[in-house]
Amino acid sequence: MTGIPTVVALSLAALGLLAVPEMTRLPEISAALPRQETQPRPIRRAVLAATALGLALVSLAPAWWWLILPAAGLLGVLLARGSPHGHSPAKRAADRRLVAVYAELLASCLDAGMAVAPALRAVSSVLSGVGVGVGAGAGPPGGAGHPAGSPVPAGPPANGKGTGPLAILDSVAAMLLLGADPKTAWRIADLDDLVAPLAAAARRSAAGGGGLADAVREHAAQLRQEIAAASVRSAGRAGVLMTAPLGVCFLPAFLCLGLAPVVVGLLGQLNIF
């Protein structure tokens, strides 16, 4: 009978290890996968892994359940936050801010009369110059070997981590400069919901001849509104979390000094004993 808990614990541990989300993946593969298919799965796997590992440890050491279960919950949170593809809320918020700046600069370039591909390259070069790496070929204008306005396609990212929306836009610029039609060049942008509206507006502009700058500027304004709404929600959530330590500190004092004497006094008046 002593071997049954061990077998159960080993089985649960194996299940938990198999369910652990992959922490490393080729960036080229993760960038090409649609977000809707890859975001929820690592969270479910993290919860399953933490639950299985926690039950395995509890079956081996039942007396330490009060310590194992919180540790398993903390492990699940860490696995969910460290899931692959970099789709954490903080990463998405940073990408949203970058795309908003990118769209505003792109609209200004289009208003100045630049074509779509050179405008994309110019914005990419500016953002690279301020420390936002979107591609190895996206140097500052007039840099060595790449004069300003020269139609040089963007190469692969220098650090191997160009999987964000700005890297997608850099790839679109490269395909347009190589002569691809707008429908084909903007197809990769449909994989990211932050730049998909830009792709749809660019295809409509190429097909019907409409202005692209207004649609790009409207998308930038919408992203700014989402950023402001997210900031308000974060501030409200921070206010709620700040009251939690106060409740933990004042609740025991209230129970000991306010509620306990009343209960003891009532019990004394009831003459139960």
Image: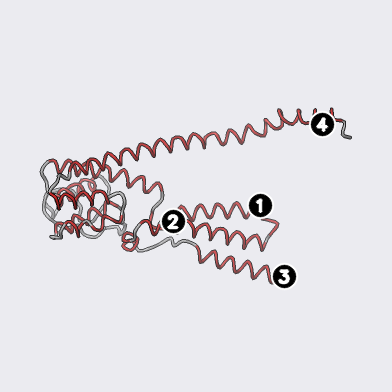
The label nearer to you, 1 versus 4, is 4
Where residue 210 appears, as percent x and y from the top left, is: 14, 46
Of pointers 1 and 2, the one earlier in the residue sequence: 2
- Residue at image position (49%, 34%) is 239
Question: Which of disc 3 and disc 2 is earlier in sequence?
Answer: 3
- 3 or 4: mark nearer the eye: 4
Please tell me whether residue 202 is drawn above or below residue 234 in the rendered image. below
106, 137: nearer the viewer: 106
The amino acid sitting under disc 1 is Trp
The percent coordinates of residue 132 (x first, y second) are 27, 48
Q: What residue is shown with label 2?
A: 40
First-in-chain label (3 vs 1):
3
Find numbered disc 4 in the image and state the secondary structure of the residue it sits on. Answer: helix
- Amino acid type of disc 2? Pro
Tell whether label 1 touches label 3 (CB within 8 Å).
no
For image coordinates 20% across by 49% down, the residue present is 125
User: How far is disc 1 from disc 4 in space, using C-alphas?
Assistant: 33 Å
| Residue at the disc numbered 3 | 2
Which residue is identified by label 4? 267
Q: Secondary structure at mark 1?
A: helix
